[in-house]
Image (spheres, rainbow, N blue to C red):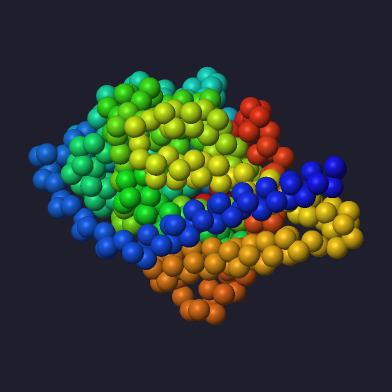
Amino acid sequence: MLLWLIDLIAGLCLVAQFVLAAYYFWLIWWRVNLPEAAPEPAAVADADLPHVLVQIPVYNEPLVVERALQSAGALDWPRDRLTIQLLDDSTDLTSDIAAHAVVRLRREGIAVDHVRRTDRTGFKAGALEAGLALCDAPFVAVFDADFVAPADWLRRAMAAMLANPRAAFVQTRIEWGNGERNWLTRAQRLMQDAHFAIEQDVRARRGLPFQFNGTGGIWRRSAVEEAGGWSHDTLSEDLDLVLRTYLRGWTGLFTMEPHVVGELPQRLEDFGAQQSRWSKGFVQVARKLLPQVWRADWTDEAKLGTTVALAQQLVFPALAAGAVALIASIIGHGHLIGLFRFLLWLWLIAMLGVLFGMTWVGYRRLRRGSLGRYLATAASVPALIVYLAVANAGAIVGAAFGRKTDFNRTPKTGT
């Protein structure tokens, strides 16, 4: 009986991974078969440009806060319709550095508010919510502290937003300033390229809910308010808000260009902590909103696609538990049974298809380099997946059962 249960666990874990593989093959198929995206909307005349609030939430970011403010201040937008908020929850010298940078921007005629809070209630979501209460701008751009944008970013992104009155938000692609720093950043960039150039692009153009990445995007204030505003009961406040706006009939826009430039974790422990936070956040949002998703008047494609996208983080505990169960099955039976031998070969083929299908399409689309360089980078991705399965499986399962954890930021170096 125990051996049968072990075999069942191993089989279910493999099935879960096959379901996720099918989702990625669906994305690859649509990326190959979708027509080229529509050209960028025409620029909007200055007289028709609305008031925009730029929010920059920071917490102990001394190496990047000044650069973030300078980047926001350099955005090409009428000065009488641009307000910058530095949402500063810092407890170190970040606030002193920021204060001097704010003074310099104000001397240039730029409206900058240095917003301090007495506590970090709600973490990033709480800071964004507090900032909204201080400004009535109808559109809100959000940048994490390590992100910078080209001067024309706001005009181009807002042109897309203004051309689509039912768009709750526009998310732009993210480039990585330290993508060539070491093997870890190269591997992360490869995975992130797949996320943006395939997953985000396909989901947005298919009309399915897709992720707001927390930075490098613009929100329509009326959509945020209709959805109930920022909520901080999960670690993925951005994904939570996306789904709540879609549930109320709004949609989102994704653009490959313009893009913003950010920073990837350069140490394995920082990468693991970041991924743990994201994984737990996805699972928390799934617990909170999946019942509403399945009751919504959405297509089956949207419901299934959203369910798999939210639950994909469970692949890490499924991978870890499946490996343990398979080893136990081999020990119990004295050999690898025929069904599992067949499923493992199928699993290997599927995983290689997903790895190369997702990453090669993005790599080629963004013209990252030679085939040899691609293969060398792609070879390191499976090791990272195994690392995440071992390091984060317990935390993900805990989030699935409702365990709450604090928002731990990823250290920034200003690279």
Q: Is residue 143 left or right of residue 329?
A: left
Image location of residue 261, percent across then percent down: 42, 54
Residue 341 in the image: x percent, y percent? Answer: 73, 65
What residue do we see at 37% from left, 54% from top? 202
Residue 125 is situated, as x and y percent measured from the top left of the image, at 47, 29
Write the residue at 39% across / 68% down. 365
Whether residue 95 is visible to the viewer of this picture, yes or no, is: no
Residue 182 x, y percent position in the rendering: 60, 65
Asked if residue 171 lies left or right of residue 13, the reply is: left
Residue name at image x 20 percent, y 47 percent: 159
Name the residue at 84% across, 52% down: 328
Counting every numbered tag in the picture gives 0
Residue 334 appears in which quarter of the rendering?
bottom right
As rendered, which of 212 and 301 lies closer to the eye?
301
Which quarter shows the N terminus?
top right
Examine the rendered structure and indicate whether residue 192 appears above or below residue 113: below
- Is 118 rendered above or below residue 199? above
Q: Is residue 401 left or right of residue 109?
A: right
**In the figure, is residue 285 to the left or right of 328?**
left
- 298 or 379: nearer the eye? 298
In the picture, residue 158 is in which quadrant? top left
- Residues 271 and 411: in front is 271
Q: Where, by quadrant of the figure, is residue 353 drawn?
A: bottom right
Q: Is residue 357 visible?
A: yes
